Amino acid sequence: MDEKKVMLSGIQPSGDLTLGSYLGAIKNWAERAESFDCYYFMADMHSITVRQDPAALRRRTLEQLAQYIACGLDPEKNTLFIQSHVHQHAELGWVLNCYTMFGELSRMTQFKDKSAKNKDNINGGLFTYPALMAADILLYQPDYVPVGEDQKQHCELTRDVAQRFNGIYGDVFKVPEPYIPKVGARIMSLSDPLSKMSKSDKDPAGSIYLMEKPEDIQRKFKRAVTDSDTENCVRYDPVNKPGVANLMAIYAAVTGKSFDEIEAEFAGQGYGKFKPAVGEAVVETLRPIREEASRIMSDKAYLESVYRAGAERASYVAEKTLRKVYKKIGFVAR
Ligand code: TRP
């Protein structure tokens, strides 16, 4: 039988999903289910490496699931689950902690960044997080791990840990490839076009959230940073006009138009016409997603049936790997 390749990815429910995550990633996930066996999970266990408000974490975890489904991820075709519902993550996470070196963890740039930002809470979990991430991945024996640039180092570490483990015990883990999708735009902040639009950005003016009201979206686009030059001309020049290039990338991603077409469309019109047009196109793209996500959020029974079924499927696969690992390392079988 020609089995589908396996793909897995996680997103932390530590902030509301943005237009950046939609256009850069989630939008392309829906059609993937045709060619891959896909697992996606809400990485709630990772989120608590930074202090969370419990009610907000719970709400965002469920909202994120609802938003994924609204973005086109079909729970019948993809395995969607909440990380903490599949206890094998914590268990393999512990094991892999013992196969991940202090020196390796010390080199992780995300640890350095996050500990600089959270000086009062540099906890052990923040440090060993990549071992848990390795467990998240290796439990499902995936071929590919679609991640953003910022997670590449963690994926490399996962490969090193898998190879180290396999070197000692034989072929237990498939060594996965990071998968940086070619399609999918890299969307930058509207207020600081040199940094990525991020759900954890402290400045909400820079990000568009999937659930945001149309008038708020429009206001943010009208205030989006363009350039300091006086040219006032819609032209694709990411080096000298990063703000305009970013708005063009957004407009291109939501309308399917090319940069040439966009330049022609706004020739001689300036940013005053261009910015609200981008806002409008984004509002119309997000409207059906927002409506569907709110509908799903209010249908608690449906949402629950999705995450339960997802956890059950995930757990079945994860348990097979965990059993193998426990046996190899010498734990007595239950
Ligand atoms: N570390 C990822 C992030 O911060 C989230 C994540 C956790 C993840 N486990 C994963 C991504 C496993 C891919 C695979 O974005």
Image: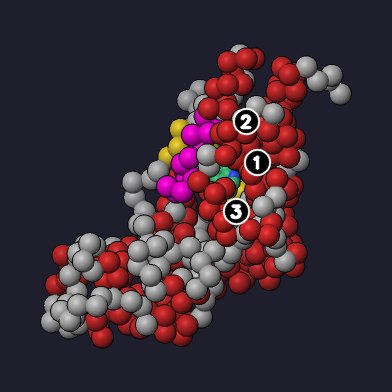
Asked if 45 appears above or below 143 in the picture, the reply is below
Is residue 152 left or right of 99 when viewed as pictured?
left
Task: Give the quadrant of the C terminus.
Answer: top right
The answer as to whether callout 3 falls within 8 Å of ligand 1 is no
Label 1 element class: helix
**Where, by quadrant of the figure, is residue 318 drawn?**
top right
Asked if 76 appears above or below 226 in the picture, the reply is above
Q: Give the range drawn in magenta.
A: 146-159
Question: Residue 226: in sight, yes or no?
Answer: yes
Q: Which residue is drawn at 33% across and 46% down?
A: 182
Disc 3 crowd rating (10 Å Cα; few below 14, some 14-19, many 20+) is some
Mark 3: which amino acid? Ser
Q: Residue at x 26, y 71 (%)?
A: 244
Label 3 element class: helix
**Which comes before the other along the chain, label 2 or label 1?**
2
Question: Residue 174: in sight, yes or no?
Answer: no
On the image, numbered disc 3 is attached to which residue?
A: 115
Disc 2 crowd rating (10 Å Cα; few below 14, some 14-19, many 20+) is many
On the image, numbered disc 2 is attached to which residue?
A: 100
**Where, by quadrant of the figure, is residue 279 drawn?**
bottom left
Where residue 200 appears, x then y in whole percent?
Answer: 54, 63
- Is 223 or 210 nearer to us in this picture? 223
**Which comes before the other along the chain, label 3 or label 1?**
3
Mark 2: which amino acid? Thr
Tell me the CA gap for discs 3 and 1: 12 Å
Label 2 element class: loop
> Closer to the camera: disc 3 or disc 1?
3
Q: Residue at x 67, y 31 (%)?
A: 96
Q: Circles 2 and 1: CB distance less than 8 Å?
A: yes
Tell me the CA gap for discs 3 and 2: 19 Å
Where residue 27 appears, x then y in whole percent?
Answer: 44, 57
17 is within the stretch colored magenta = no
